[in-house]
Amino acid sequence: MNNKTINRQIRKISTSTTLPILVFLIAANVFKYPLLFFSGIAPENSILKDNGFLNLIIYIFMYLIIIPLIALIFQKVKGNKVGIKLSSLYTKPKKSAFWCFKWIIITMGFAYIASIISNIFFMIIEYMTETTLNEASFNFGDSVIGTVVLIIAPVIFAPIFEELLFRGVVLKNSEPMGQWFAIIISGIIFGLWHENYPQFLFAAVLGCFSAFMVIKTRSIIPSMIAHFSINTISTVVQLFFKNYNIDIEEIANMSNYELLNSVNLPFLLFAALIEIILFGLIITAIVFFIIELVKHKGKANLVKSVFNINTSRKIAVFMCSPVTLFTFSLMVLSTIINAIPTT
């Protein structure tokens, strides 16, 4: 193939990779903002004033309607042409149960390491600039519906439907660029898709390791388990803090004596347990990862790109697709805007 043909095919792959994400973002916002508008003008006793109910409707629309439609369109337009069946991703993994367990631990551990690194980095940025960046708040309200949404959105909807979108549609679309490329680009897109700076690196690393598991096992089940486990831990912590009405920032500024005298024993025990679990998870992940590196001599044995060109050119051409450029710009801009202090 000549250079012109290669460039055209790469841009086509690029567009098919990021267009589903752009469609999702547009559809979600077109649905969300009118709903928020009607909530603002609704009577005080209206159910539209309940943040839990609003979020339930939004998540149902995004996860139960938009993502399945995107997956269906992918299957009809491209999947059938190239012999890809997304339903096949839900089959038994092609690796042993121990291999899956090991890489689920590695995935979770390195995601938490990324979160720690990200927190330290932005703490330094805030200290150097003397500003406090705005973290995205997830206000589900105090109603029963809000609590239900807090549980089902991250614990049930996200592991099922986000994995379908990113480790299914996005990963499969970009795989002709080479499996390493597909792993990294799908992870970066997954990180930016959250449009929340504290979650970017965490989600990107989670996305990369999850994509690796999908490629190696030819199944989406291990990545769903990792996603479910991480979100479940996060949800349990949020529910616990919510029940005890704990101000995390206030606790961070307390001395040990003040902490012992102001916070009840169940909270201290729970916080200590979570810290021990996460520390053990990270250490185990590092050990497993080193063993894997030594065992395979640092080689992942992934399929190379169908295009025999250097990496820098591959990236440049991939990013030249107007749809891809716009989608990345939109996600980056949203992340920056969401981080700007409101006061």
Image (cartoon, rainbow, N blue to C red):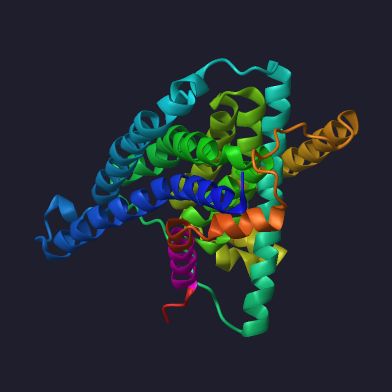
Q: Main secondary structure of the magenta part?
A: helix
Across and down, in percent, residue 56 comes to 28, 44
State the residue in front, 293 or 121. Answer: 293
Quarter of the rendering containing residue 182: top right
Q: Please name the residue shown 18% across and 63% down the image.
A: 37
Q: Is residue 332 magenta?
A: yes
Across and down, in percent, residue 89 comes to 51, 23
Quarter of the rendering containing residue 280: top right
Across and down, in percent, residue 341 comes to 47, 77
Q: Residue furthest front?
A: 2
Residue 186 in view, yes or no: yes
Q: Is residue 104 magenta?
A: no
- The segment highlighted magenta reads 327-339
Q: Please identify the quadrant where the N terminus is shown.
A: top right
State the residue in front, 28 or 342. Answer: 28
Counting every numbered tag in the picture gives 0
Residue 203 in view, yes or no: no
Left or right of 114: which side holds 28? left
Q: Please name the residue shown 48% across and 57% down the image.
A: 321
Q: Please name the residue shown 29% across and 51% down the image.
A: 27
Left or right of 61: which side holds 195? right
State the residue in front, 63 or 217. Answer: 217
Left or right of 269: which side holds 72? left
Instruction: Say if 258 sits above or below 88 in the image.
Output: below
Left or right of 175: which side holds 16? left
State the residue in front, 294 or 127. Answer: 294
Instruction: Say if 41 sits above or below 239 in the image.
Output: below
